[in-house]
Image (tube, rainbow, N blue to C red):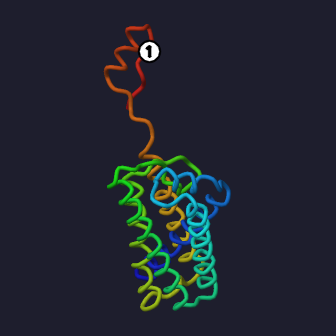
Amino acid sequence: MSTLIGAVATGVILLVLVAGCAAHLSRPTALPDALRAHRMLPARAVPLAARAVTLAEGLLGLGLAAALLGRHRLGLATALAASGALFVCYALYARHILATGRGGPCGCSRAEVPMSDWIVGRAWTFALLALGAAPLVAGPARPPDGAAETATAALAALTLAALLWVLPTAMAGPAAPSASSDRSDLSKGGHPAWTS
């Protein structure tokens, strides 16, 4: 069981790091704009911080991929621990932004996702996955054996990573219309909205 848990957690972290780095590279203004909106850094430090975050995610993703392909346990555990530390920093930063009432977009993806407790929770989840997998891959967990075990771990990692990645966006969607707005639509000759 520890083999599957370690493999899935490693896959999730690898996918999230690659997705984060790719999002920052494909939309290079999103993270700097978010950092400016947070008003935590001096204006001159914003571009440097945005580049550092992108570089950290990219290097950690490459390190994880190389250690995974080379089946290097210590390298894999080190990359997971470093990734966990990065996600702890993200969680603490997001929590501080919310606690000080600064708000703004998270800057973590191509989508305009507002800073929220969902962002904080997602960062903590990634941190716990990375920090929990590090001792597993360094110790008792062995790499998946055979195509079936590898495919199961890969599909589970892809599914979990995708769900966690879109969770804040999904939770930040527009609120459902209230009953009073449905009644006002009816009074104007409109049709009630479908609900299920």
Q: Nearer the viewer, residue 105 or 11?
A: 105
The residue at which mark 1 appears reads as 191
Locate the C terminus and report the quarter of the image it occupies. Answer: top left
Total tally of numbered discs in the picture = 1
> What is the x, y in percent for residue 53?
56, 68
Q: Nearer the viewer, residue 59 or 66?
A: 59
Lateral position of residue 77 relative to residue 102, left or right: right
Lateral position of residue 110 relative to residue 12, left or right: right
Q: Quadrant of residue 18?
A: bottom right
Measured along the vertical axis of the image, is residue 136 above or below residue 57?
A: below
- Residue at 42%, 73% in the rendered image: 129
> What is the x, y in percent for residue 121?
37, 60
Measured along the vertical axis of the image, is residue 97 above or below residue 182?
A: below
- Residue at 39%, 54% in the rendered image: 118
Disc 1 marks which amino acid? Answer: His
> What is the x, y in percent for residue 93?
41, 63
Q: Nearer the viewer, residue 56 or 68?
A: 56
Measured along the vertical axis of the image, is residue 39 above or below residue 91?
A: above
SS category of the residue bearing label 1:
loop
> What is the x, y in percent for residue 176?
38, 32
Is disc 1 surrounded by few (<14), some (14 to 19) or many (20+) residues within 10 Å?
A: few
